[in-house]
Structure formats: structure tokens, C-alpha cells
Image: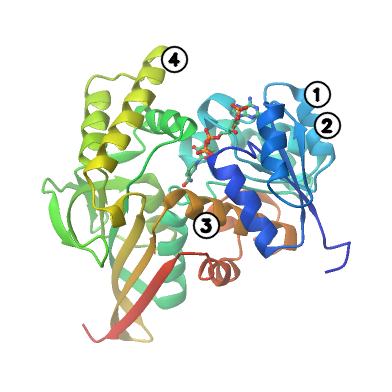
Amino acid sequence: MSDKKRKTIGIIGGYGVIGIDVCRWLLQTTPHTIILGGRDKEKGMRAAAGFDNVRFMAADVEDPVSLDAFCSECDLVVNCTGPSRILGDGVASVALEKGIDYVDPSGGESLYNNVYAKHRKKILEKGLCFILSAGVFPGLSELLPDYIIKTGFDRVDRVTYHYCAYGDLSWASAWDFVCTLEENVGEGWICLRDGKKEKETQARMVPLPPPVGRIEMIPLLTEGLIRVGGYNNVTTIYEYHSVGKNLLASMLSIVGEERYRTADEKRQSANELIKGADADLGTMAEALQYCVMIHMEMDGVLDGNRQKTVTTAYHPSGYPMTAMTVADTARLVADGAVAGPGLHHFENGVDQSKFMDLFRKQEGLVYTHSVSGEL
Ligand SMILES: NC(=O)c1ccc[n+]([C@@H]2O[C@H](COP(=O)([O-])OP(=O)(O)OC[C@H]3O[C@@H](n4cnc5c(N)ncnc54)[C@H](OP(=O)(O)O)[C@@H]3O)[C@@H](O)[C@H]2O)c1
């Protein structure tokens, strides 16, 4: 690759759980130059020393001068800092000022609408590409169903969607998780039937493919899947989720008692979620301990024929899957394989078929898709 195509990608939060694996995957799959950024010089230098030709620059999201210096060195910045609900649009604002593209695994409607949308006009004017929620959940949880619907059907009548994820929670993820509980980003015990939200009060025992197998799942209709249904005129969506029992109990108690109103409550609730997730790890079969599975069945029509598709994406460990997705997104942005300038949710930001080519090559991923005709 010529020097012109070799870009400098800055990963701020670069020695965090996601950031370090974004660096690893970018080095493994692209020729780009990587700079890690973060507040702790010692941790940063140690992380950078673990790779060839990666350097560290001290940068604090809450210190615009250091952020400015960091972004000045980059063609694209990947924001792996968190919690995103505390740090807001600090990195995005400086990226915009410096005129560089931006990728972020965090997102969701509240960040998109309340925090980032104010930059939309300027992002377009400057011809930049900003992609939010480029992770697994949110992220793949929307892109995968959108891709299957758009590439495999003329019309989808019904989506049945299952998502399960187990494993420990980083501090930033736990805090953001508490905020999503506060923002009520999913409606529990609801499904979408013929365009109307209806009560779906039964948890279901679902036979998911191995290694997950038969598990209890609860109905939860997320804003992300409603959005995807909206783009594609899908009026019937059954969405089910599974998390560990202790984590679920903590979530229900935090929501029931509204223990997310103050920063102190959020801190305590985040710690409770971390403990709940850890306790679940101790009770689970080894094969499930850190895994993520998205399993979808769709019924609809292609070329006048009814058909059904079954798609499963499984990874034995959720954080590397998130990191590889962030890194593949950064790669596509650097290569210009994106929808064009603008502020995008992940599923609208990347060239979906190019992303899927990279996704299928992610280390450890098991991806299957089958089509059967005439229901
Ligand atoms: N979409 C998805 O599927 C998905 C999945 C997992 C995570 N995420 C999101 O990804 C983000 C990172 O998660 P993670 O699990 O990697 O969290 P993490 O391990 O806690 O890492 C966060 C990093 O941010 C750094 N940081 C915190 N405050 C900073 C500041 N003011 N300036 C510079 N750096 C700062 C931390 O280092 P210091 O504290 O030493 O500065 C740390 O390196 C979170 O927002 C999380 O919600 C998304």
C-alpha cells in the first residue's frame, strides 16, 4: 500500500479492554500507523511497548489542549474511552475541529440525538464521516438484521431475534449499562405485531444452536431493532434476550428502585452489575462464560417466492468481537468504504457488504446463514 493510503489512526482509551484489541486487530489486518492515547502515561507506554511501531501520547478527553495535540497527529480517531455517558462528545468535538473522521463503539439513540446530532451540519459541511455504535450491542445487533433483510428479501413479514451475551463487565461498560437502564432503551415484555406494540408476557425456552443450547429468554424490544424494522417496513418483530441470572436480578432491582438518579447511585449500581456478571461466570458452563450469540429467523418473500432464513453469529468472547468490529469499521472509514459524509449509526455508516466480508474473517467467529424456500 502506498504511503498516501497508509493512514494514522489514533485510538484514545487505547489501553482499555476494547482499545487494546482494536490496536491488535488493526495491526494484524491493515498497514495503518497506530497511536494509542489515554490519561495514564505508564499504562499507555506499557501497552504501546507490547506492539511493534505503536507509540503512546498522553491525552485526556477532559483536557482539550492534549486532545487537540493527539488529534493533530491522526487522520482518523477511534474513541474507546468511557463511560461514554460521562465523557460525551469531547473527542468528537475536537475531531470535528481538526477535520478528521471519527469512529466510536458507543452510541444508542440518546447519545446520537442529544449529544452528537448538534454536530451533524458541520460534519457534513466538512465532508467528514462520523460513525457511532460500531460495536456488538449496539452495532452488529442492528447491522446484521438490516443486512440480511436488505440482501436476502424483497419483503420480510416477521423477524424473530435472539441475543445472548455473558461475561465480565468493564467499568466503562457497566456505567454505560446503568445509563441505558435509566434511558429505558428497550421495552421489556413487548413485541411488535402487525405494526403495533403488544404485551408478550412469557419468557421462552429457546433451543439456540450449540454451544449455547436450550436457554430461557425474555422478550425485550430494543430501539435499535425498531429502527431497523422501520427502515425495512417490517411490522412483526419478536426479540428475546438472555443474560446471566445474577446480572438480570441486579438489572431488575436497579430499574425497580430507580437506582440511577445520581452519580453516586450510578457508581453503586455499576459496581452491582459488575459483581452480578462476575457471580454468573462462576455458575456457567465454560463454553458460555464470555460468549455472544445473535440468532435470527426471518420469514418473507424474494422474487415472488416465500422463504425463511436462519442466521447465527457466535463468538466465544464478546470484547474481542466488539474490538474487531470497531477496528474493521475504522479500516473501512480509512479506505473510504462508507456511506459518505455525515453522522451515522453503524448500520448506515459502513458499506455493509464490504463490512460483512471483513466480519466473516474475524478471528474466532462462527457465522452461518441458511435459506429454505416455500414455507
Ligand atoms: N457497542 C458495544 O458492543 C460495546 C461493547 C463494549 C464496550 N463498549 C463501549 O466502549 C467504551 C470502552 O469500553 P471498555 O470496555 O474498553 O472500557 P474500559 O476498559 O474501562 O476502558 C476505558 C478507557 O478509557 C480511558 N479513559 C477514561 N477516561 C478518560 C479520559 N478522560 N481521557 C482519556 N482516556 C480516558 C481509560 O483509561 P484511564 O482511566 O487510565 O484514563 C480506559 O483506558 C465504553 O464507552 C463502552 O460503553 C461498547
Q: Earlier in the sequence, mark 3 or mark 2?
A: 2
Q: Which residue is mark 4?
A: 263
Judge the density around disc 2: few (<14), some (14-19), many (≥20) Cα neighbours within 10 Å: some
Judge the density around disc 1: few (<14), some (14-19), many (≥20) Cα neighbours within 10 Å: few
Q: Which residue is mark 1?
A: 65
> Residue 153: in sight, yes or no?
yes
Q: Which residue is mark 2?
A: 69
Q: Image height check: is 278 above or below 141?
A: above
Which residue occupies the foreground of this view, 143 or 135?
135
Separation of marks 3 and 2 at Cα, in angstroms: 31 Å
Judge the density around disc 3: few (<14), some (14-19), many (≥20) Cα neighbours within 10 Å: many
Q: Which residue is mark 3?
A: 347
Residue under the point 37% across and 24% down: 271
Q: Image height check: is 304 above or below 51?
A: below
Spot occupied by residue 341 in the image (x, y as percentages of width and height) = 71, 53
Q: Amino acid at mark 2?
A: Ala
